């Protein structure tokens, strides 16, 4: 498929997008991976995208899981928390319920199902382009992030504002957390794309780097 | 990297054209569209070669000196290359040595494509040219050579693309010549090609240089071309061998079911000895009773039995084949005591029947019985080819192997019949509009689908909105009554005042959720195109879904419902009727959306059991990688593959599923078929939970519907009662507490 530059990467990370239906999870992901914006069909079950990025001189392969928002699919989506290094909690700044659901529903899910105790959480308020309709203030977002120990950004998948930054901040934080790097050197062969043979020399010693 | 491209644009499936899509599932798929184009040019090449060859022949004046060299043959045109030539490759329509047709086998490379041609030598004159060239030193009398000429035309393989080939089987009889049988992905097969001067190995080696050729794990003599479709058959075959308890005594086979069909190009040469069909039959019977002087290859026998070409070519007029129609005679006319020959009517009917008679064991064998019996009776040639016995499927001029579990192999060899058209639909109705034979109707639709122009009517029956035994008048009344009822339901929420809505969170939430989803449902389809809610049909979608969430308040609205409704509204194109059709569908699928997800879990569990039954190694693999929850099939099941196919194919699939013909859970067999089709990749690449889900999601838009339906049908038939036993009662879309399968009758 996509002819990319090669098999080498230093780390492979699993990121998860969660949050209420319609807050723009898939749109954020599409903006991040292909820099486009489109009217997307509601996600059924779970979707998946890949992106290679270079950050702080390290080549990273991001596997990003995009889950259906409706709570009725929760028994399904819960199984996808396994092994994630980062979770992006998305809400819609124009819909308060999507914000309150994060603490009432989604954070509990993370605590319940995440297998990485140090898993990085990132709070993202989407749709800041609709400023006139905004009902959740930035301060509220910051307060939430403080309370629950999350990174925080406001963004717009539509205007692309801050989208790149969301992922970068999250990934940087993961890179800065040694305990999360333990299993990310591509030894999980199944996360490699078929056409990319596992290359054990790809990241010599990167996992030990605690800088 | 193209993250987006690699990510599979599942959301834009509706705009995806199959022709552009890479079809992982079936390389043969493209043959429908591209074959004609590709082969046209190849045919032109062949025409050139044909002319060239004819010249050579005329110059050399002898059959045996047609050793046109490669150099001579190639380079006639610039844009192709002959990469393999073998002379004296023959078809043996009869065991009579005089009846053999020798010719030249070629592999022609044209661009990235490889084509095979087999052109018989012309030594009797080129009837299609209208000329009659008498060859000096010819062995035959005039009549004989004329008949032989017809055979030659019938057997000519002008250009078959490698992409059309499924497999090549090499036969090395203890005595006699090596020969090959080529089976096409369509299930058709060419008659055996005998290599009088050797060269089979070289032939295979040449193909291997240009295409993927894999030796079958089951049979070292079988080479799988392109080898994508194989895993299903292979695993099914191994399954049959290990788990099929009792095989007919006549089944010595250890190989995959072989659909064996003769596909011939039939030129309409003008001949003066025109005969009527009936007399032809007699003649051919008389002919068939002629004594044979030596034991011959059983597979050859069988091929002959069913290929009218072999039998009739010598007797029949080219006119009978003029329209490329083929008749197949299911009887062994070479060997006495010949079973009763079918009348022409029977021949035509039996084709229909054979296609439709797989559902029960008792008739699954009917079409094959004669073949089996013949084989049992056969004591002539007990060499290693005893497995090529076959049965007929006359309607589509197919000849299918009856070796093992017959039905699935029949399914594989069969092309889908055309969809149910309006005229045929009317023939299912009595004068007052009742469907006289609902089961026959469902069977018909299961196999062929429905033409778009009658789809909107027939769907209402399939979904259960109309009763099969209702009259025109009753349905008219029903429509009116249900419209009123719908308006009442709709008014329930439309009359909620803004003040009331303020204090009605559930209502607001539902409406909001529906509104959010309908504006992102199938917008690439012209019917729903537009921005926001500026399309009236989007508003109808919304109204129906909100109304439904009031009609079924406990269930409410859930994502995926808009996917299920969209095609129904598109087809039915009437708000109230679409609502009731949707509501009828939800009677079956509501458990998919239950809060506890029990409906989904029971289907995924049933799927797991089916895979365990039908593909044990794959099951074991999933177990090993901890994937037995089958969550990766969640979307397939939740919305009946709505996101996996383009819109038109979704319609085609759904009407098949809704017939409940072979199984109420045919969609689960679809899942098994798809997994089996990709099993090799899944296991070779050691896909686990993550990669597996990604892989499955990205199959969207790349699945070949028809071949998957065929595979699923074969699997369903094969699984039979054991398959049904994997699916607990009440598993959606079954309605619990109702007579199984009775909902639509």
Image (cartoon, rainbow, N blue to C red):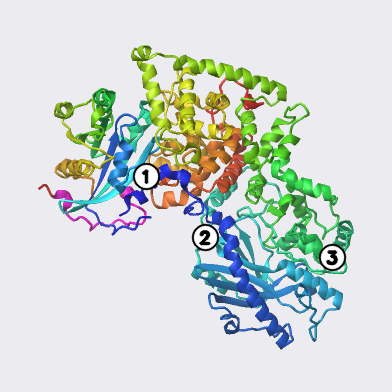
- Relative height, residue A40 to residue B371 (above, below): above
Horizontal placement of B476 versus B491: left or right? right
Badge 3 element: loop
Structural crowding at the residue carrying mark 3, measured as other residues with C-alpha within 10 Å and reported as few (<14), some (14–19) or many (≥20): many
Q: Where residue B315 appears, x then y in whole percent?
A: 84, 65
On residue B226, which mark appears? 2
Left or right, A63 with respect to B365, comes to left
Q: Disc 3: which chain?
A: B
Which residues fall within the magenta stretch?
A: A189-208
Question: To which quarter of the image does residue A49 belong?
Answer: top left
* In the image, residue A196 lies in the stretch drawn in magenta: yes
The structure residue drawn at horizontal position 79% and vertical position 81%, both measured from the top left corner, is B133
Which of pointers 2 and 3 lies earlier in the amino acid sequence?
2
Kindly check if marks 2 and 1 are in contact, taking CB atoms under 8 A apart as contact.
Answer: no
Q: Which residue is mark 1?
A: B688
**Tag 2's secondary structure?**
loop
- Is residue B200 part of the magenta span, yes or no? no
* Residue B726 in view here: no
Quarter of the image that includes the N terminus of chain A = bottom left
Foreground: disc 3 or disc 1: 3
């Amino acid at each position: 498929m996509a002819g990319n530059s090669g098999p080498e990467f230093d780390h492979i990370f699993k990121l998860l997008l969660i949050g209420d239906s319609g807050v723009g999870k898939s749109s954020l992901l599409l903006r991040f991976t292909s820099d486009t914006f489109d009217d997307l069909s509601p996600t059924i079950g779970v979707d998946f995208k890949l992106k290679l990025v270079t950050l702080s001189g390290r080549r990273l392969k991001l596997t990003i899981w995009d889950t259906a928002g409706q709570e009725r699919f929760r028994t399904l989506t819960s199984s996808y928390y396994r092994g994630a290094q980062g979770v992006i909690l998305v809400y819609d700044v124009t819909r308060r319920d999507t914000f309150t659901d994060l603490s009432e529903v989604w954070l509990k899910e993370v605590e319940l199902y995440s297998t990485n105790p140090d898993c990085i959480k990132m709070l993202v308020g989407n749709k800041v382009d609709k400023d006139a309709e905004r009902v959740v203030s930035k301060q509220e977002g910051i307060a939430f992030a403080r309370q629950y120990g999350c990174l925080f950004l406001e963004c717009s998948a539509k205007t692309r504002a801050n989208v790149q930054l969301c992922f970068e901040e999250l990934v940087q934080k993961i890179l800065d957390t040694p305990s999360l790097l333990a299993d990310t050197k591509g030894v999980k062969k199944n996360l490699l794309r078929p056409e990319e043979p596992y290359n054990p020399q790809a990241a010599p010693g990167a996992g030990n780097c605690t800088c | 990297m193209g993250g987006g491209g690699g990510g599979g644009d599942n959301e834009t499936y509706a705009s995806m054209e199959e022709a552009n899509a890479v079809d992982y599932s079936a390389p043969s798929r493209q043959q429908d569209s591209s074959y004609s184009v590709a082969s046209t040019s190849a045919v032109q090449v062949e025409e050139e070669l044909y002319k060239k060859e004819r010249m050579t022949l005329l110059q050399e004046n002898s059959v045996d000196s047609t050793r046109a060299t490669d150099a001579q043959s190639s380079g006639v045109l610039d844009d192709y290359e002959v990469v393999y030539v073998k002379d004296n490759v023959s078809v043996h329509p009869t065991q009579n040595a005089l009846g053999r047709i020798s010719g030249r086998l070629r592999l022609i490379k044209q661009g990235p494509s490889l084509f095979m041609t087999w052109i018989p030598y012309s030594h009797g004159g080129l009837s299609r040219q209208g000329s009659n060239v008498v060859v000096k030193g010819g062995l035959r009398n005039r009549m004989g050579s004329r008949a032989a000429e017809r055979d030659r035309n019938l057997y000519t393989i002008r250009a078959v693309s490698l992409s059309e080939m499924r497999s090549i089987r090499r036969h090395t009889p203890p005595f006699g010549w090596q020969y090959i049988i080529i089976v096409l992905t369509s299930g058709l097969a060419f008659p055996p090609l005998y290599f009088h001067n050797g060269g089979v190995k070289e032939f295979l080696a040449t193909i291997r240089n240009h295409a993927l050729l894999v030796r079958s794990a089951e049979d070292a003599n079988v080479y799988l071309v392109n080898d994508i479709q194989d895993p299903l058959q292979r695993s099914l075959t191994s399954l049959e061998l290990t788990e099929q308890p009792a095989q007919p005594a006549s089944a010595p086979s250890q190989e995959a079911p072989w659909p064996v069909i003769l596909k011939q190009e039939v030129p309409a040469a003008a001949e003066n000895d025109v005969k009527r069909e009936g007399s032809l039959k007699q003649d051919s019977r008389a002919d068939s009773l002629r004594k044979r002087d030596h034991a011959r290859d059983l597979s050859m026998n069988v091929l002959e039995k069913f290929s009218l070409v072999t039998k009739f070519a010598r007797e029949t007029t080219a006119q009978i084949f003029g329209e490329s129609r083929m008749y197949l005679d299911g009887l062994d006319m070479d060997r006495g005591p010949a079973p009763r020959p079918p009348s022409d009517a029977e021949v035509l009917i039996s084709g229909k029947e054979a296609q439709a008679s797989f559902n029960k064991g008792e008739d699954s064998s009917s079409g094959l019985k004669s073949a089996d019996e013949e084989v049992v009776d056969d004591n002539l040639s007990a060499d290693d080819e005893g497995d090529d016995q076959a049965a007929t499927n006359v309607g589509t001029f197919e000849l299918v192997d009856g070796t093992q579990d017959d039905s699935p192999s029949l399914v594989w060899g069969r092309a889908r019949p055309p969809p149910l058209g309006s005229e045929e639909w009317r023939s299912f109705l009595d004068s007052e509009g009742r469907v006289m034979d609902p089961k026959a109707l469902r069977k018909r639709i299961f196999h062929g689908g429905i033409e778009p122009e009658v789809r909107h009517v027939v769907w209402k029956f399939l979904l259960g909105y109309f009763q099969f035994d209702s009259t025109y008048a009753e349905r008219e009344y029903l429509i009116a009554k249900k419209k009123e009822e719908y308006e009442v339901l709709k008014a329930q929420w439309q009359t909620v005042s803004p003040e009331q809505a303020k204090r009605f969170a559930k209502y607001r939430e539902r409406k909001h959720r529906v509104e959010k989803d309908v504006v992102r449902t199938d917008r690439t389809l012209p019917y729903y195109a537009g921005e926001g809610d500026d399309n009236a049909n989007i508003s109808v979608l919304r109204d129906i879904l909100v109304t439904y969430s009031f009609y079924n308040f406990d269930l409410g609205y859930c994502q995926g419902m808009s996917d299920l409704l969209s095609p129904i509204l598109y087809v039915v194109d009437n708000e109230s009727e679409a609502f009731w059709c949707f509501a009828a569908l939800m009677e079956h699928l509501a458990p998919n959306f239950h809060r506890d997800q029990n409906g989904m879990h029971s289907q995924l569990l049933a799927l797991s059991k089916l895979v365990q039954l039908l593909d044990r190694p794959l099951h074991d693999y999933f177990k090993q990688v901890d994937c037995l929850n089958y969550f990766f099939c969640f979307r397939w099941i939740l919305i009946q593959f709505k996101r996996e196919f383009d819109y038109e194919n979704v319609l085609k699939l759904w009407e098949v599923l809704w017939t409940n013909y072979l199984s109420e859970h045919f969609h689960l067999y679809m899942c098994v078929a798809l997994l089996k089709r990709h099993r090799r990749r899944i296991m070779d690449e050691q896909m686990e939970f993550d990669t597996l889900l990604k892989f499955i999601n990205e199959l969207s838009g790349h699945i070949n519907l028809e071949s998957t339906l065929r595979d699923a049908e074969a699997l369903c038939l094969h699984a039979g009662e054991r398959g049904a036993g994997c699916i607990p009662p009440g598993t959606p879309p079954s309605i619990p507490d109702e007579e199984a399968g009775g909902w639509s009758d």
